[in-house]
Image: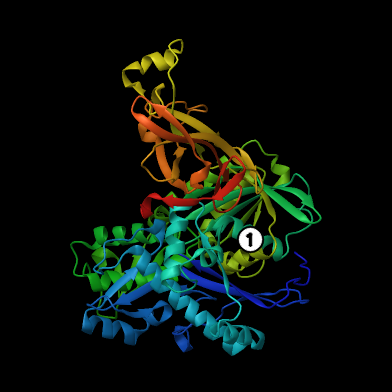
């Protein structure tokens, strides 16, 4: 278990972590009080969770209702109340769910962008997190009252799937600004940190007490976070046990085979099975799916036993479709088929992650809401047993692992190095060399540059290769010569490109154009006086040699532009912002 030191800051601070999941979402908070050891608390109650509608553990459904004029009406657990459903039906409200899966949405009738919908959801969670803190924590109440009067700002940690990076983080930050979590300026942007769900889960497991037999130098742990939308699989090596320090030892994987995919397959099965019956109506299918999600799916264990889905009353009977007194029967093999694609994907990911590792020194940790499925657990246990691996689920409510783990990430970074997900670099032109076969091959593309040099385009200048272990302080640099006509401004920019192909040394972007993707553009504005002057075939120009500096070992990419005698902060502009 992590033993934190007392907070050494000079003033109180509130930190809030928000885990917006595909099916369920939650929040946690921490109060930093000078001289006091920080504690992490989950938000345990949201509106609509009272009485019989009490939601499972600490989370609320990731759902929203909008009226016909695109006004937000209900969110979370409140959107699941029967009174809400009746009013929504009567007034023809639009229902939005799965609002954050890869920052895309299923077809909806709401004329709002995904970022705006995410902003509405963040604003709701933030509001009721503050309400919860005010009611339950006197110190937190004082901080919030001071904050409302221009007191200490609040820091935020937002979690996201392993497969997300800069573009999605940029969208999340924009949503947080729209939701008024932070102001729209550099100071506000700096108050938001991001962490992957896999790393947050690792932090939670360490904080809640991994055994000393696991936390040993050169031991490995694979986190399998089974959520609603994604399965996030990450592997770490323990570098030191006192204090606990780890590093990524494999590229994290993000598989879109969470519990919602089981639901999708179940709905498809039911519609096909009942398409010729009187029970194929949307109302009946929705009633069946409600029971399937809340009862049938989470309790399924035995593929040789029959499972039941209650949806109607005594008069709802049709033996031809295995429906008796409002209860539909599904065979064990039918139920197993709904889980199998997800289970197979998880098995494959585990196999990839532990390849080459000593099974005697490798442990699998199963966390997340979907991980509580008995059938999933037994299938994965059989798989890891065959590989000589250990697997278990940590004590406590692992469904809150991401929100609380995000705060442990903020309080005490344990991951000292991460693995580059892709090969990164920049496209540039290079002086033409007639003795270089690759240049000769592209001679028809050669052209005269502004300074009079003959150049060929499409060269890929590699910044770092896929699989490279990168520490939080590692800086990657590459030179950039920038030329401007005398009449243009002083802005300088360079595209950061990711290569997703199989080559270990990609050299030209025109050879596999489909494998190169512009991740973002680095922009900066050096002082006008730093530019040199020259004359070329097309007239006067200005030029300067720069170095783009990137940090890839953090949970979010950082950049600077350096030139002689100075360093300039740079802005990363992602494609979705262009």
Categorize mark 1 by other alpha carbons within 10 Å: few (<14), some (14-19), many (20+).
Answer: some
Classify residue 206 as left or right of residue 136: right
Residue 348 can be seen in this image: no
Classify residue 69 as left or right of residue 352: left
- Along the line of sight, the residue nearer the viewer: 100 or 416: 416
The residue at the far right in this view is: 242
Residue 358, percent across and down? 70, 39
Residue topped by disc 1:
393
Residue 99, percent across and down? 38, 65
Q: Please name the residue shown 45% across and 39% down the image.
A: 497
Residue 174, percent across and down? 43, 64
Q: Is residue 109 above or below residue 425?
A: below
Residue 128 can be seen in this image: yes
Colour mapping used in the image:
rainbow
- Along the line of sight, the residue nearer the viewer: 227 or 138: 138
User: Could you say whether the residue bearing mark 1 is in a helix, strand or loop?
Assistant: loop
Residue 211, percent across and down? 76, 59
- Along the line of sight, the residue nearer the viewer: 82 or 28: 28
- Along the line of sight, the residue nearer the viewer: 43 or 59: 43
Q: Please name the residue shown 40% across and 68% down the image.
A: 118
The residue at the far top in this view is: 435
**Which of the 4 quarters of the picture holds residue 53?**
bottom left
**Which of the 4 quarters of the picture holds residue 266?**
bottom left
**Which of the 4 quarters of the picture holds residue 32?**
bottom right
Classify residue 567 as left or right of residue 271: right
């Amino acid at each position: 278990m992590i033993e934190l030191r007392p907070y050494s800051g000079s003033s109180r601070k509130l930190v809030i972590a928000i885990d917006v999941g595909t099916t369920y979402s939650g929040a946690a908070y921490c109060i930093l009080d000078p001289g006091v050891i920080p504690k992490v608390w989950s938000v345990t109650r949201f509106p609509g969770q009272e009485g019989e509608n009490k939601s499972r553990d600490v989370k609320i459904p990731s759902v929203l209702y909008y009226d016909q004029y695109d006004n937000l009406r209900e969110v979370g657990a409140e959107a699941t109340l029967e009174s809400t459903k009746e009013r929504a039906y009567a007034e023809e409200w639009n229902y939005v769910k799965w609002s954050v899966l890869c920052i895309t949405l299923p077809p909806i009738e709401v004329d709002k962008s995904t970022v705006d919908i995410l902003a509405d959801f963040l604003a709701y969670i933030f509001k009721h997190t503050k309400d919860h803190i005010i009611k339950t924590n006197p110190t937190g109440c004082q901080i919030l009252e001071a904050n409302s009067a221009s007191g200490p700002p609040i820091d935020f940690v937002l979690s996201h799937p392993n497969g997300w990076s800069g573009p999605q983080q940029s969208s999340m930050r924009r949503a947080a600004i729209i939701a008024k979590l932070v102001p729209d300026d550099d100071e506000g942007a700096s108050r938001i940190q991001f962490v992957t769900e896999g790393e947050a889960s690792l932090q939670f497991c360490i904080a809640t007490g991994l055994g000393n037999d696991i936390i040993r130098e050169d031991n490995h742990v694979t986190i399998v976070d089974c959520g609603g939308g994604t399965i996030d699989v990450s592997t770490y090596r323990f570098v030191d046990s006192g204090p606990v320090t780890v590093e990524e030892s494999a590229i994290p994987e993000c598989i879109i085979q969470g519990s919602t995919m089981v639901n999708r397959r179940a709905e498809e099965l039911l519609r096909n099975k009942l398409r010729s019956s009187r029970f194929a109506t949307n109302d009946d299918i929705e009633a069946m799916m409600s029971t399937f999600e809340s009862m049938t799916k989470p309790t399924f264990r035995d593929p040789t036993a029959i499972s039941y889905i209650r949806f109607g009353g005594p008069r709802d009977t049709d033996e031809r479709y295995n429906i008796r007194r409002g209860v539909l029967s599904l065979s064990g093999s039918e139920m197993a088929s709904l889980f199998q694609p997800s289970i197979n994907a998880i098995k494959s990911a585990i196999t990839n992650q532990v390849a080459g590792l000593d099974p005697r020194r490798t442990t699998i940790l199963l966390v997340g809401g979907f991980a509580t499925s008995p059938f999933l657990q037994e299938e994965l246990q059989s798989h890891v047993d065959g590989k000589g691996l250990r697997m278990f689920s940590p004590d406590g409510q692992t469904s809150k692992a991401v929100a609380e783990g995000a705060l442990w990430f903020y309080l005490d970074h344990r991951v000292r190095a991460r693995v580059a997900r892709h090969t990164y670099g920049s496209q540039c032109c290079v002086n033409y060399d007639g003795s270089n076969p690759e240049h000769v091959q592209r001679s028809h593309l050669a052209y005269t540059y502004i300074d009079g040099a003959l150049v060929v385009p499409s060269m890929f200048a590699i910044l770092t290769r896929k699989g490279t272990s990168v520490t939080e302080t590692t800086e990657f640099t590459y030179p950039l010569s920038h030329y401007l006509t005398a009449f243009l401004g002083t802005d300088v920019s360079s595209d950061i490109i990711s290569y997703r192909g199989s080559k270990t040394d990609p050299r030209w972007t025109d050879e596999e154009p489909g494998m190169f993707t512009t991740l973002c553009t680095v922009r900066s504005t050096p002082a006008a006086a730093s530019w040199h002057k020259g004359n070329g075939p097309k007239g006067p120009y200005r030029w300067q040699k720069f170095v783009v500096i990137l940090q890839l070992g953090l949970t979010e990419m950082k950049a600077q532009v350096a030139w002689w005698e100075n360093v300039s902060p740079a802005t990363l502009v992602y494609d979705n912002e262009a």
